[in-house]
Every structure is written in structure tokens, then in C-alpha cells.
Amino acid sequence: MELTTSEIIQAIETLPSAERAEIRQWLNEERKAENAKKADDNWQIERYKKARKWLDKHSEEYMNQWVCLEGDQLIAHGTDGLEVHRKAKEAGIKIPFVHHIVPEIDWGGW
């Protein structure tokens, strides 16, 4: 049996104040978790934008190498992607952004 929002609200209104306070606390915790997720998503997007800008500016310098970026900061680079990832983890990067820089292919303008 599914309850409507109105039915849930009516049921909550009949609860003692202590139990309503528990529900209020639970809702506040849910809101905080949602806000934290949104903040994390925004942080990840900004981090990627900064990395993309760095790549646009520095790709020629690191051609055919793997780079690890934290936003617009170069953390590690080299020809071995696993080694670059390992260095990033050692530097304390929880989720390393590792990218292999290779020449772009011109597909001839189809």
C-alpha cells in the first residue's frame, strides 16, 4: 500500500512532538547529505574545467605522456600511466585525474 504525501503529513501530525522532532532531524540530515552531494558534484565539475584548461595550454609540452592533474595543478607525469597514478595516490589525491596526451587525429572533415 502506497501512501500519498497528504496521508503521510496527516500521520506525522498525529505523532507526539518527540517523534516529530526525530522526523525533522532525519529530514535535516537528508537535506545536508543532498547539499553535500551537490557541492561535491560542483567541485568535480570545476576541477575538470580547470584540468581541461591546463591541458589546452600545456599539451604540447607533455605530448605522449600521462599526466595527473588536480584542477590546474600538475601532480605527476611520465610515460607509464600506472606509475603516474601511483604517484598521485602517494601525493594524497583520492581520485586522480589521469590523462594520456596524444596527438589529435584529423579525420578529413566529413
Image (cartoon, helix red, strand yellow):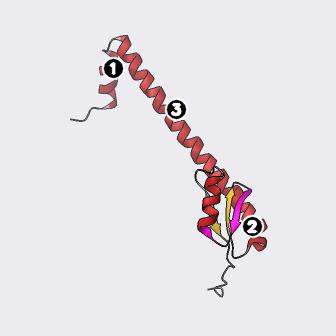
In the picture, measured across the screen, residue 35 lies left or right of residue 75, that is left
Packing grade of label 3 (10 A; few <14, some 14-19, many >=20) is few
Q: Which tag is nearer the camera, tag 3 or tag 1?
A: 3
Secondary structure found at label 2 = helix
Dividing the picture into quarters, in which one does residue 84 lie? Answer: bottom right
Between 70 and 5, which is closer to the camera in this rendering?
70
Q: Position of residue 82 (x, y in %)?
A: 59, 66
In this view, 12 is above or below 74: above
Secondary structure found at label 1 = helix
Q: Is residue 47 magenta?
A: no
Instruction: Looking at the image, tell me whether mark 2 or mark 3 is earlier in sequence order.
Output: 3
Instruction: Looking at the image, tell me whether mark 3 or mark 1 is earlier in sequence order.
Output: 1
Q: Which tag is nearer the camera, tag 2 or tag 1?
A: 2
Q: Which kind of residue does numbered mark 2 sit on?
A: Asp
Secondary structure found at label 3 = helix
- Between the C-alphas of marks 2 and 1, the distance is 55 Å
Which quadrant: the N terminus?
A: top left
Residue labelled with disc 3: 32
Residue labelled with disc 2: 56
Dividing the picture into quarters, in which one does residue 85 lie? Answer: bottom right
Residue labelled with disc 1: 12
- The region drawn magenta spans 72-81
Instruction: Looking at the image, tell me whether mark 2 or mark 1 is earlier in sequence order.
Output: 1
Q: Position of residue 88 (x, y in %)?
A: 64, 57
Q: Which kind of residue does numbered mark 1 sit on?
A: Ile
Packing grade of label 2 (10 A; few <14, some 14-19, many >=20) is few
Between 4 and 46, which is closer to the camera in this rendering?
46
Dividing the picture into quarters, in which one does residue 101 lie? Answer: bottom right
